[in-house]
Image (cartoon, rainbow, N blue to C red):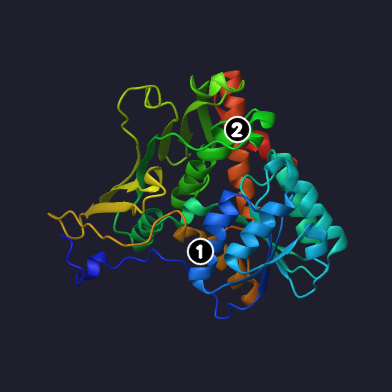
Amino acid sequence: MNETSDPWLDLSYLPRLPADKTPAIGCIGAGFIMADCHLVAYRQAGFRPVAIASRHPERARQVAERHGLDAYDTYQQMLENRGVQVVDIAVPPDLQFRVIRDIVDHHPHVRGILAQKPLGVDYAQAAKIVHMCQAAGITLAVNQNMRYDQSIRACKDLLNRGLLGEPVFASIDMRAIPHWMPWQQRMGWVTLRIMSIHHLDTFRYLLGDPSRVMASVRPDPRTSKQFEHRDGICLYILEYDDHRRAAAWDDVWTGPAREGALSDLGIRWRVEGLEGMARGTIGWPDYPHRTPSTLDFTTCHRPGYWFQPRWDEVWFPDAFVGPMAQLLVALEEGSEPEISGRDNLGTMALVDACYLSAEQHRAVDLAEITSGDKT
């Protein structure tokens, strides 16, 4: 049943936009995420990016020409323009701390920062970033953009409306081959901090914070030919004290799909409750083809139907409107962003707990990671 006039299909899946879209945004970083996702999404939302800088000035000039921005050789030069009060950072995670510290120390006119995920190299560094921004009075948000995938946001609306009842179990099954970035080799990371972080944050968004996690990882045979790593294929289970469970299989091997065999790629998710069940797909593995994510749900409140709302928007790049929108709304209203730096510490702690669990072959309580932090 998918008639668009049916109110059961009218779910809230788009982000709330600010009333004032005119704040000038300065962009740091000119890679794919900035050039093909952030700036494309901002243009279609009516936001106002005005300037860009990168470690590679020529690339910044190319992106600036494409998107109608002013290009600078360094972000410090860009931030001499005191009209730029919102900064969008998309640099490798091992460089993000020093960029944010420089903004905090030398550019007091900056009011808001949208930082890329992961927020630093680990939980401890992320906590320092949050403390720095709090002390400086800067509103910090994190670009955990899978929360703004249309199917995930619509599922959250189902949970908020009580149509699924009390959550029982959630799962994500990813069989996809991401495009790895060159900086991952120097970090020794493949999946947990780059792709699994989306799924861990999504579980937190839908179900809240778990108490502990159990994780198992192995190297990805394909990426192992390029550099050593531990976290190729990742499996993990999240435990909640009220008996809820969540689990994910992040399989970036997917069989020899690049070595001559046929491929079977996709991301499927599922949320089961006492009064309903939702299942969906994430369209991202088909990028650059525009493939919207999907959602099907059934509920005891209207038994006998599979409801199948559909939309035209896609995760990449349309969902990238959401992280910037929630930062601009927070600045406009003097409120906390939906994905504040402080909230995102829960996701960073969960990632660190997965690494520790996989290393020590045991369940890890989140408190083991967060103890001592006073944020």
Q: In terms of secondary structure, where does tag 2 sit?
A: helix
Identify the residue at horizontal 71%, vertical 46% (top origin).
Answer: 126
Q: Position of residue 157 (x, y in %)?
A: 37, 61
Disc 2 residue crowd, few under 14, some 14–19, many 20+, Cα 10 Å: many
Give the CA distance from mark 1 to mark 2. 33 Å
Identify the residue at horizontal 23%, vertical 66% (top origin).
Answer: 8
Residue 373 visible somewhere in the drawing: no
Q: Position of residue 328 (x, y in %)?
A: 61, 71
Q: Position of residue 274 (x, y in %)?
A: 28, 48
Confirm or deny contact between disc 1 and disc 2 (CB under 8 A).
Answer: no
Q: Amino acid at mark 1?
A: Ala
Identify the residue at horizontal 56%, vertical 39% (top origin).
Answer: 194
Disc 1 residue crowd, few under 14, some 14–19, many 20+, Cα 10 Å: many
Identify the residue at horizontal 33%, vertical 62% (top origin).
Answer: 312
Does 322 sit left or right of 277 as displayed? right
Q: Amino acid at mark 2?
A: Ala
Residue 92 visible somewhere in the drawing: yes
Q: Is residue 375 above or below residue 134?
A: above
Q: Nearer the viewer, residue 241 or 301?
A: 301
Does 136 sit left or right of 293 as displayed? right
Residue beneath label 2, please? 353
Q: In terms of secondary structure, where does tag 1 sit?
A: helix
**Which label lies toward us, 1 or 2?**
1
Q: Position of residue 301 (x, y in %)?
A: 21, 60
Q: Tell me the quarter of the picture where residue 368 sits.
A: top right
Does 228 sit left or right of 153 as displayed? right
Label for residue 41?
Answer: 1
